[in-house]
Image (cartoon, helix red, strand yellow):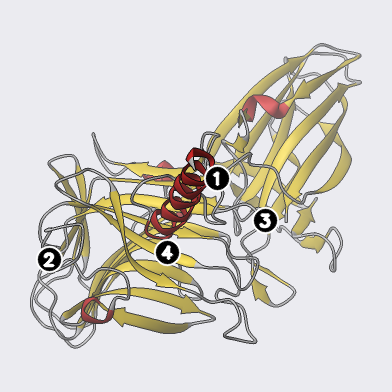
Amino acid sequence: MRKILSAVAIALVLFTSSVFADNGQKRLFSAFGQQLVAEETLVAALHFPYNINTRHLEGGAVTLTGSGSSSHANSMAELNTTAAINSGARIASRNVLRYINGVGAVVKFTAVFDTCVAGNTQWVGVGDDNDALFFGCNGDTFSVNRRANGTDNISAQTSWNRRQLSGQDPGTNMVLNPQKGNVYAITYQWLGFGRITFSIEDQYTGKFEVVHAIDYANTSTTPSLFNPTLPLCIDNQNTTNDTAVTLRVASMGAFTQGKHHGVEVTNSHSQTLSATATEAAVFTIQNKSTFASITNRVSVAPTLLTLANSGNKDAIFRIVRGTTLGGSPSYSDKDTNTSVVSIDEAGTTLTGGVDLGDFAVSAGSQIVVNLNALVEEDHVKDVLRPGEILTVGAAITSAGTGDVTVGLVWKEQM
């Protein structure tokens, strides 16, 4: 009899655990329903304790529409429309939540939304104009949004299929007020057709409550997102609304639910230059904005740099991201069908940009530089994003002469 009761008890525990696993109340599970036993790996982040640091932003700036503006107050980024139609502001992160095949992904953030009004959208999450997963205001309705190939698929709070946080949900008395700071999370499997889960922290328990889930498997013949590698995004836009709206965000983080390793393609290039005392570009690699006629989201990570100096004086080499190239740059694809990189050997002078390293090489010698110093643990710290360029420049000191040669190896994170 005791054995029968024990078996029943075990079965009840297993059944109860499986039920609780679905709503995320009792145990912590990955996007694929596996109990999490490993740390999530941070791959992209934005926070604003001091200011809006444009080094962390896509394109190095906040993107403004019309008379829109950005500001910083109370350790938060503020994106502002004005009392005018067609005004707004958007922040997108340089680092992206890179999709790893078969590994779940999650974005967590805090936000203080303004009152939802018709003719305005306020979105926070991951994404761009083509693909996105968001919480926010769709006109006068607080909602979640799955954007796929430029088309929004919006579910209003009143139609959320897990909890609507109206004070009437089982297990929580929380009444959501988006005009107060809340903690949000979006988890997705992808693989083309996996589940997407939207969650909000319960103010009474501190645990995430699943509010809406898109059970995408067995429902469609096209993927839920056309490209699942996405930047963090904060977007506040007036379309037909002509009142001022302010969207505030304190912190955002994007994580893979496991190690950050994925499909990569390795490429390289080398070039020799007759150097002088005036610094000149040896060559430049560009991460193209489009690849195969599609918006490119592949990152390029330089890994190894070889510098040789056959001149009669020391040579100074410099690697710079985002310089303005003089002369008449002309780019050619490394490989049109397999690489997102194009290469220029015609550019001359370097003006501005972000200096990533300076190296002195004595006359008649060479050095090999391991650029993994630009990589932090399992995720890339400083890489080329689509549309950006990396240039290696060189000069011979003390009016010397001679050839310098540069070789660069990089990985394309497909």
Residue at image mark 1: 257
Q: Which kind of residue does numbered mark 2 sit on?
A: Asp
Q: Residue furthest front?
A: 1
Sequence-earlier tag: 1 or 3: 3
Quarter-of-image position of residue 334: bottom right
Residue at image mark 2: 114
- Tell me if residue 263 can be seen: yes
Helix or strand or loop: what does disc 3 sit on? loop
Tell us which disc is closer to us: 2 or 1.
1
Q: Are marks 3 and 2 in contact (CB under 8 Å)?
A: no
Residue at image mark 3: 102
Q: Position of residue 304 (x, y in %)?
A: 79, 31
Left or right of 106: which side holds 367?
right
Q: Is residue 307 above or below residue 53?
A: above
Tell us which disc is closer to us: 3 or 2.
3
In the drawing, what numbered circle is on residue 384? Answer: none
Q: Is residue 411 above or below residue 148?
A: above
Helix or strand or loop: what does disc 1 sit on? loop
Q: Position of residue 327 (x, y in %)?
A: 69, 53
Q: Quadrant of the C terminus?
A: bottom right
Q: CA distance from mark 3 to mark 2?
A: 36 Å
